Image (spheres, rainbow, N blue to C red):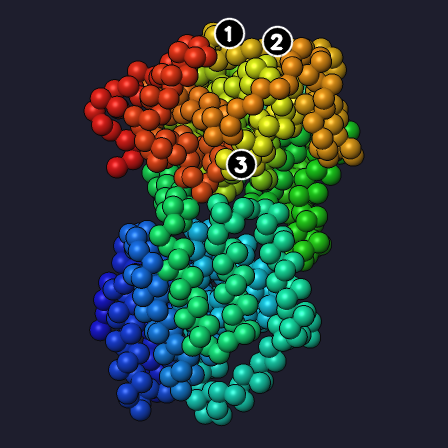
Amino acid sequence: MSVPGMTHKIDAEGILYIVFDRQGEKVNLLGKTVLEELARVLEEASRRDDVRAILFASAKPKMFVAGMDVEEISSVNDAYRAAEGARFGQAIFEQVAQIGRPSACAIGGTCLGGGTELALACTFRVAADEPSLRIGLPEVKIGIVPGFGGTQRLPRLVGLPASLDMILTGRGLTAKQAKRIGLVDRIVPASYLEREALGLLRRAAADGIDAVVRSLKRPRPLAARLAGRIGPLRRYVLNQARKKTESKVNPLEYPAPFRAIHAVEAAFLHEMPQGLDYEARVVGELVPTPTSKNLIWLFKSHASLKGDNAGIQAVPRRVRRCSVIGAGVMGGGIAQLVANREVPVRLKDVRYDAILTALRTARSVYDHKLKRRRMTEREVAQKMAFIAPTLDDSGLRQVDLVIEAVVESLEIKRQVLAQAEHHLDDRAVFATNTSSLPIREIAAHAVYPERVVGLHFFNPVHRMPLVEVIKGQRSSPEALATVRSFALALGKVPVVVRDEPGFLVNRILMLYLNEALGLLREGLKIETIDAAMSGFGMPMGPLALLDQVGLDTAGHVADVLKAAFGARLGGDDTLLRAMVASGRLGQKNGKGFYRYRDGKRTTPDAEVYGLLECEPGTEIPPETLQERMVFAMINEAIVCLQDGVVREPRDVDLAMVMGTGFPAFRGGLLRHADSVGIPIVADRLSRLAEAHGERYRPAGSLQQMVREQRRFYA
Ligand code: NAD
């Protein structure tokens, strides 16, 4: 018997095999149909005496179950239906747990959300020794909590600290990590997976479940056990988790992790039925929130971006070896990223000390993982061994891709390209990480200009998910497809943009930063401007961001944009110039709009007002400040769409969230515009244009959208 997504059979030995296999897809999901079938099969099994054990498996390689179908979650708009949906799943998994026969999950690869919750309901969990395997509960990333018993069973199995870590970060564990905390019982080569699980089931059917579970000697660290059981200790651990979460996100913007802490606490305060009921009510509360809707929307957008070809009709070339030229801040970060994917990378610079610093920077990315015991020294050493430092061009012939990250000078970048072309194989791709120079200019004297593309990473490279893939005038589809596919392999979000000054993100961001400088000029305080935008949900205010980027660097980008777009994007560059002229470069030299101690931002620097001849005293409500800064960005994003810099609104929204930290709970810049209302945005921009100047004049296509009563998203 089968439904699309799942098959089952009972063999002569009385083992019920339930095998997930969504037809025509790479991933298995738990949709309503599969869950209903699962309920029916379990119901039947519970009535049959000849079923001795249950084995859950998947017919797909490297994939168990990737969770619930988010499409089904996002279609639910009321708390009652959402809670009922959770109760439905809980009841099925409770039946697995209570069926009185041993059960096992054979986890061959990705096991997320509902997949992990099913595994938790089983007696045994066996995982494949497969590097890409991840077991996790990522629900907080879509603004909800695990709703099929995950918040109740995980803490009971692995203790309070480990379960909080998994549920609050949403991070997937490798098989080894899962074994270390007692989440999986055995790790075996993929080809032995079913055999091992069957072995456990047979033993349990013969000797009794308890005897086999005891023999597994699941790790139960004393501290983890006590943390849950002793009231004051438990409250302390929960409080620490709450504080840590508060330091990262605001409960009004992202309620899920805070509600998850309560749900996990309930696992220690109540019996299973009450705990499950609490969990279902929390799911009911969270599913209809705009935050969850927006996060799911971003998740789906990301998936669709990965799935389409961005309009590039070419087969990407596989990158087996790579070279990074320029071992500075960016080059070091890029080399680490490439090495982390276990692709050999030559890291070239003209200075040996730069290479040493870059290697140290690359290594420091791993220090955090070492400290948190997510990697071992040996694993780090293995990754670092993929980076080969060099001062010459030896070996360049073997690489499929060069990523150039030397200083931002057209002349030097052209020289580097010319020199590389001497050595490179004809089909090798040359990607430049320039943040402001036109790709067509860099490629102007190239022998093979078609192989030159832009690949713009953001700083810090290992943290910022966005890369802009820039299509130069003569870049070939194959070169573009190759860097885009490589960026995806590096785990980045590649947005393809046209070769226009500032590309996409810096162009939109410049308007925002200009607005902030304009407000400073109008007499607002540094902290008032920044607090308004932190209040909107940005990770930091615009003036703090300017300090972080570097005032000289920002000034350089402003010059490029002013030269290209004139007054609209030029802004008032006298302030930036005055700051740089007085020796204020921002965080890097400890002097900017803020003061710095040991590299850390402390207080706004009041001397700035005198220097810039601004008189702080003007009061404007934060909502108005937000409107001015955010609507300016919306307007420019619309101009970018109008000019074909990017193909669709989705690309703008992903780029802004992944590249600038635009608040994900708002779904992105243009989705935010939709939620405010397109006519309201246009009306406010017209009024701002009357009051503050032409730069606010609503873009032509915005006015057209108002006339046609259109939104960015249906
Ligand atoms: P950086 O000054 O830290 O490093 C540049 C490195 O290039 C130096 O180590 C220098 O020795 C080396 N170099 C100079 N000439 C060279 C040559 N001919 N061959 C090999 N190496 C050479 O600069 P960075 O901040 O890493 O920026 C590098 C590039 O990335 C620039 O184009 C910049 O615009 C771009 N970028 C920077 C950031 C950022 O935030 N720093 C963000 C995005 C893009």
Q: Residues under labels 2 and 3: Cα distance?
A: 28 Å
Question: As drawn, is 40 to the left or to the right of 471?
Answer: left
Q: Residues under labels 1 and 3: Cα distance?
A: 33 Å
Q: Nearer the viewer, mark 1 or mark 3?
A: 3
Q: Please provide percent x and percent y for residue 368.
A: 68, 49
Mark closest to the chain's N terminus, 1 or 3: 3
Residue designated by label 3: 535
Q: Nearer the viewer, mark 2 or mark 3?
A: 3
Can residue 310 be spotted in the picture? no
Dot 2 alpha-carbon crowd within 10 angstroms: few under 14, some 14 to 19, many 20 or more: few
Residue found at x 51% / y 37%: 537
Can residue 43 be spotted in the picture? yes
Q: Which mark is residue 563?
A: 1
Question: As drawn, is 492 to the left or to the right of 375?
Answer: left
Q: Which mark is residue 574?
A: 2
Q: Amino acid at mark 1?
A: Ala
Mark closest to the chain's N terminus, 2 or 1: 1
55 above or below 677?
Answer: below
User: Quadrant of the rendered structure where residue 31 is?
Assistant: bottom left
51 above or below 2?
Answer: below
Q: Please provide percent x and percent y for residue 111.
A: 44, 61
Front residue of this view, candidates 303 and 409:
303
